Amino acid sequence: MHATIGRHLRKKTGELGPFVPASIDETHRIGTITGTHGGRCRIEALAELLTAWLGRSDVPDVDLNHEHIGDDVAEGVRAAGDLLSRLLLDTSTAALAPDQMMAAVIADMAAEVAEPTNAATLGLAAQQVADAADAAEVANAMWSAFCPNAVGLRDDWASAVGSLRARRALHAVEPAAEAIKPHQILLTSNVLLAPPLGNTDRLPDIEVSAAAQALVEQPAAFYDHPVPLDTPPARHELVYGLSALDRAIGFERSRGVLSGSVAMLLSVSTTHTALEPVALDHVSRLLGECRLPNLEVFAFAESSSRRLVDEVLGPALQRLGRSSAGVRRVFGTAGPYGRHYSFLKSIAALWSVVVDDRVRATFKVDLDQTLPQQQIVAETGLSAFEQLTLGAWGGRALDANRDEVTLDFIAATLVNEADIAGGLHVPDITDPGPPTRPEHFIFYPALPQAVSTEGEMMPGPDGGARQRVHVTGGTTGATVAGLRRLRPFAPSFWGRAEDQAFALSVEGQEPRPATLHMPGLVMRHDKQSFARDAIDAAAVDKLIGDHERILMFSAYTRLIDPGRSWLETRLAPFTGAYVSRMPVTLAYLHLALTTLSWAAAGRAEAGRLFADGVRRLDAARRFVSLNGRFAEEIEADRQGWKDFHDALDHLDAALVAGKPWANIARQKAQLIVNEARTGGPTIGQGRSE
């Protein structure tokens, strides 16, 4: 064992306190799991594997000596070290933590490790680690227990990529009966706002007051890189992204692909509830500084989306004998990613009924991405909107198993701004190389992500059609017909990877819906050039979100495929990397090791990473494991979306029949939409002919 580990554990042996249960319910559960109420919890197989791994001299050291760490980060870092120490203390048992929260965490770890298949996997991995010839073999052995989708990828990269392409292949593609036309696509995007980082001189007093209130409340949602209110327009994602998109639409008009402006619907979301009342005015003020002749921008916040439910869908729900509560729950822009992602998809279905019946599809862009139109045309011969309207979208095909799939969804590709000089098809995620930090040996999703990027998104030697499982929040589209038939949704409580959770909601439907890869549609990812400060500010929350993602995806896939007979294989390699058979063990172990790595590197955020991570993970752990609440919440969301689509179908039929109440609902919808408009002409007063 490494010297730092050994010295620390000898010192800590007499310091670890007794088990203090979190609650009576947790005490009973812990005793049931471990077969003891004496304060010790069997995690033998895990302890043996960790001891074998850290005992090698050819893997990165884990430093549990905290004397050199400053007081400002020490508490969180010491807690991370203590967790790892307790898991390593004894090859047969580990003392339960004196902390109430961590006692329950270690009990959950013990339950996972005690499951016979998991125990056998850990035991085999420990033997493989002991027998490994080098660090690469150690990594594969560790990943076999904790990150199986990474095993062997670096041993034969070409084979891994080729195998993935074969699994994603589509055959006998049948185009849609009627191809989607450029003017039939509703564009959507989201703007995510956060409190200012410090400079409030340019903000109106009402925004300064809202920001002050936000700083004393807990965040309502965590986003990857929300834009602080004090971000200057020249560096603001909203201004940057819409200005670039406007130029891209102008390019389409110059080619004759589009004859007029294009509707762009924005969802406006905030990290803190206190910012919601000022968010729309903030966005309107920013857009007032933009010249967007090719876009009609409609901005919706929670208040305006609530009006759509109450005033437009409400009358239909009332006639169906249902309350609006279920739809209010799921349809809106406030809260985690999942809620506004679903809003931005489902709004197209509503839009086609009460605003513009020409709309047959929707496509979401992220505002840190731009369309390099001239390069797209130079390399493919078609513009972006010409790519979008290729006939396969909305058609059918056979997958690699020769099962029928419907092509209701599409996904484009990203290229980094720094790489685009090498062409459109340069992977934005590349081989991260061998593991170099301790946490990489536990969980290394960058590796399957790189294989997935090349295998699913880059051109293959055969040039054939392909489906996607690995998608991103932007660069995704859906047909209105597919949305109304399938009724997909991302759970309203979902954080990171909401796009992939959205796809999971339709698993089990026949024929299976698939996402069509659009090989010629490439968006340039520009976030590093203007959003660096926002990205850095959100680094801790983003990483914690990845750990929550492990718990959430593992629970969701168990709900869909309890026997684990098919879904894990379909989601491999990248999406499935977050599906674990020991999710609590993986999430907390990786969090602890990452915290210690950050501390060793002198990163000041190390303490906050573990402290905030444990707090958020505890909420997620309880949510997915106790009393079936996770399944109940998923089902409540599904019912909410059923109510939404049932009401929309009823309203649509009533409009066709000329029912007066339906015409009034449509007029109210158009009033709400016109009030959301931030530029461009007023929308039409009725359906187009």
Image (cartoon, rainbow, N blue to C red):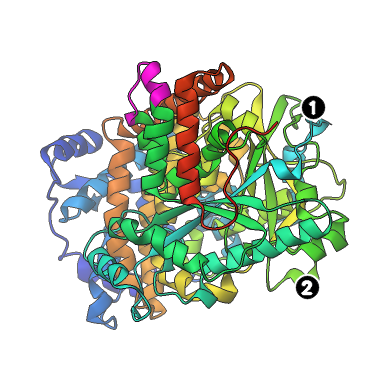
> Which part of the image, by quadrant, shows the N terminus?
bottom left
Q: Earlier in the sequence, mark 1 or mark 2?
A: 1
Looking at the rendered structure, the kind of residue marked 1 is: Ala
Between 362 and 536, the one nearer to me in the picture? 362
Q: Residue at x 82, y 50 (%)?
A: 460
Is 371 rendered above or below residue 127? below
In the picture, residue 276 is in which quadrant?
A: bottom left
* Range covered by the magenta-colored residues: 315-325
Is 69 rendered above or below residue 504? below
Give residue 561's position: percent from left, percent from top.
50, 28
Between 474 and 313, the one nearer to me in the picture? 313
Q: Which residue does the numbered mark 1 point to in the structure image?
A: 177
Q: Residue at x 48, y 69 (%)?
A: 535
> Which part of the image, by quadrant, shows the C terminus?
top right
Say left or right for 252 vs 633.
right
Q: Residues within 10 Å of mark 1 (few under 14, many from 20)?
A: few
Query: Is residue 90 visible from the viewing direction of this image?
Result: no
Looking at the rendered structure, the kind of residue marked 2 is: Ala
Q: Which residue does the numbered mark 2 point to in the structure image?
A: 421
Q: Residue at x 48, y 24 (%)?
A: 662
Give residue 432's position: percent from left, percent from top.
62, 65
